[in-house]
Amino acid sequence: MLEYARWKYILVAAVLLLALLFALPNFFGEDRALQVARKDHGAVTADAEHALESFLQQHNIRVGKSYIDNGRLMVRFASVGDQLAARDAVEEQYKGTYITALTSAPRTPALLRTLGLRPMPLGLDLRGGLYLLYQVDVNSAVGTALDGYVQDVRRALAAASIPVKDVTTVALGSDKPNAVRIVLPPEADVSAARSALTTPLQGLSLNVDNLASGSAITATMTTAQIRERQDYAIQQNITTLRNRVNELGVSEPIVQRQGIDRINVQLPGVQNSAEVKDILGRVATLEFRLEDMQNNAIEAQQTGHVPLGSKLYTHTRFGRPVLLKREVIATGDQLTNATSGQSQEGPAVNIKLDARAGENMLKTTRANLNKRMAVVLIEKRRETTEVNGQKVSREVTDEEVVNDATIRGIFSNSFQITGLQAGEARELALLLRSGSLATVIYEIEERAVGPTLGAKNIQEGVTALVVGMAGVFLFMAIYYKVFGLVADLVLLANVVLLTALLSMMRASLSLPGIAGIILTVGMAVDANVLIYERIREELRRGVSPQAAIRAGFEKAFSAIFDSNITTLIAGVVLWVFGTGPIRGFAIVLTLGIATSMFTSLMGSRALLTLMYGGRRKIARLAI
Amino acid sequence: MEFFSHATNYPFMATRKVWYTLSAVLMVVALVSFFTRGLNLAIDFTGGVNAEVNFPRTVNVDEVRTHLAGAGFHDPQVAIFGSARDISIRLPPDSKQTSTAEIRARLDGALKAIDPGAQVAQLDVVGPQVGNELRISALEALGFTLFMIFIYIAFRFHTWRLSSGAIFAVLHDPILVIGFFSLTQMSFDLAVVAAILAVIGYSLNDTVVVFDRIRERFETNRRSPPAVVLDQSINQTLSRTIMTKVVTSIVVVALLFLGGSVLKGFSAALLIGIIAGTYSSIYISSAIALDFGLTAEHVFPSVKKAALDHLP
């Protein structure tokens, strides 16, 4: 007699039905599409949609159903050729108005979409796009923090009237600066200095050395503080990169941290890497400074004699010289938000600073009402020059005043810059936000796949999948007859289950991922073969058909389990160590082992018991 | 339908010297080639530039090379693939710390100078530092996988005689794959490493199945000489071993011929690995256990222990 517990039937049926539902969106496929967004971030209207559609039709481009999503127009196309032609046409005609991005629009029915069921996202190697890996100079973030402490220390000691010889950043037990060293003259009161420093140096470990020439206080950042600072720098860079990516109008971009000090940016559908990198690669910071009102900037520019304690800048918009005091009131990394908006006096930029900068701003504005304050944007880029026939890459710093305005009130961490033109306000807000990128980032890896190649990759991958599966199905059906067909069904269920899991995880499918699915099909056969060979063996020994099926499953179990574990080990290691498409392969391989164990052990047993189970008499098995 | 008669009885143990020699020769060739010729490491590991460019007209390889050299790229490798409009370019890593952005800009400049309609279909620019790291992390992944599998083997088989056979199989298969890549100088990239790891895991599964059968046979057949038991075990699992590998090979061959250029190396590595793995699990791993003196007593030292073995 051959039986299988009812709850196991129910489990198998429930899992497979659920899997079918989750896998369903993948079978509708995708249309090539063009996303059209307004450059000024406004919404695309229905009129504009019709205008664009007829414009494309005039260019003999076949346009599918278009729709507006979140103020952005999505136009579908039947082929990559139409999509690319449409992109070129729109770019040429509407360069100033629209930003376009190549993308794809799933054909999933609205009902499934509202249920939150979506197809697996395709990796860049399948849909085309640009991958960039940035290295963040996290040590410079720590350096910036230390410089801030140096300033705070100077200010705190001056406020408490304690004389100071020198305040510098030093490296203690590390090759990078991690501490501030405060050297006091012999007459200074060390304990008074210590208590004056408790607030500005909160959390740092203080250490006092008594030297012959006076005392020295060393304030060291803890490892946790350094890590926190580095994490903050990465996080801020990610936010800024995200904002800049959004400016590009790319659909479904990914900006994420990778490892300790890396950020990877994935931009599906993007082709023009030069333009992208112009926008993403800028490294900028800001400084709020007071203007030097005692001296004449034009005179300083003409004579080349800049007064002590001041520095000469040029105004970005007006090109006029501006003299600024050296002391920095607030820096870009202290800027928490900058948005353009409206005030009673017209367009304005609303600025928010963090608490420390706010305190500083309060003191400064209180003492300098009706004087002028300026914002300096400092951009760093790398430039390669030839020196003695050798190419030398060096960092170049451009500093410009992006705005100067009169201080009209006393404020701390929240204020407005007014008196701007509409476009100017938006641009300034953007510049300010991008200036909050406090640390230098370098691009260290770039991978780009063209849209036609992406389409070719999908096609080749799918062809290999279909042909490989058909080969396996045919082979199994011939070799194991009815049992072979059962195995084929089980293999199909396995692919559905795997697809469902990948769709649920939103793991993006890469070409190696497709290879992983194909390989899973090939390897999942193993479990069925083990079981069937056992059943044949049992039959040869003269065991009754039903007993042979039961014995086959039971005796093959340990071999199936054990033989999968080693592949599982390799898959998990690859998952941990791999990045990008390789990780995609590892995910598929690992999940595939799990799903194939489930389908071949439980699924095929349920099916075979349905077919041969119960009390009926079976003379022979078609195996 | 069946390919194998019910009771094959190939004398694997008696002929093991032949198979040892064959394996030894193959491994020596693989290792000698690896240490003398090395691998054709892809830019994943060396850093540098790999590009596929489509031109609107047919272009001359020398023309492309001259323009690239003019743009300051040393030793550019230029090849035609597909039609004469499709050019693949490989640039070695830049010893100086040039940013990938700048490399890209120079490359774009050189290509536009050849023909303004040049389209970059695929481009990989890997900084030397990333290349180094990927090389290290690939080695780490390889080392870690082997380590985990050795731990598994140590727990799985209760005697070091069987473990040695399994460890040999685990080392044998990737060495042959690496040897193949060294001999053919096919591009060795990250995907190939992934395939090798999969091979290490996958090829061991035959050995596990054969060894399981050996334990089972020893249980019912304590008096037979070990060589006979091993031969029986391999013969009884032979049809399963070959069947499974044939089916997996079907999909891998589909991948190799239809999966496109990106997956060529990956599927070649899998195919070689599967063939090597099948060979080693049939001909080598059990034979090694025999030569280390495996007997029923090693698998079942006492009856009590035998009962414990069946617990998971």
Image: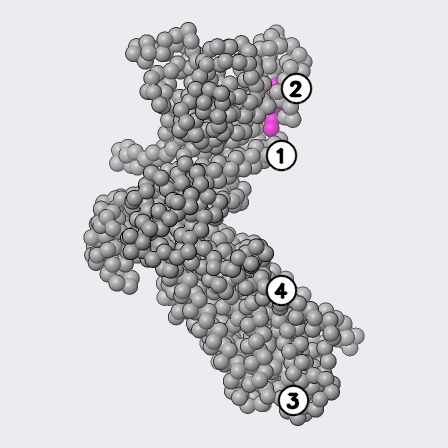
Q: Name the chain letter of the residue that bears numbered label 3.
A: A
In this orientation, which residue lies closer to the viewer: A484 or B174? A484
- The disc, 4 or 1, on the residue closer to the chain's N-terminal end is 4
Q: Residue at 40% across / 64% down in the picture?
A: A459
Of marks 4 and 3, the one in the foreground: 4
Helix, strand or loop under label 4: helix
Q: In the rendering, at what x and y percent does residue A396 appear?
A: 37, 29
**Amino acid bearing label 3:** Leu
How far apart, in angstroms, are the residues tagged by discs 4 and 1?
45 Å
How far apart, in angstroms, are the residues tagged by discs 2 and 3?
85 Å
Q: Which residue is mark 1?
A: A224
Q: Which residue is mark 3?
A: A539
Q: Residue at 33% across / 47% down in the picture?
A: A90
**Amino acid bearing label 2:** Thr
In this orientation, which residue lies closer to the viewer: A611 or B102? A611
Q: Which residue is mark 2?
A: A198
Helix, strand or loop under label 1: helix
Same chain, labels 2 and 4 = yes
Q: Which residue is mark 4?
A: A18
How far apart, in angstroms, are the residues tagged by discs 2 and 4?
60 Å
The C terminus of chain A, quarter of image: bottom right
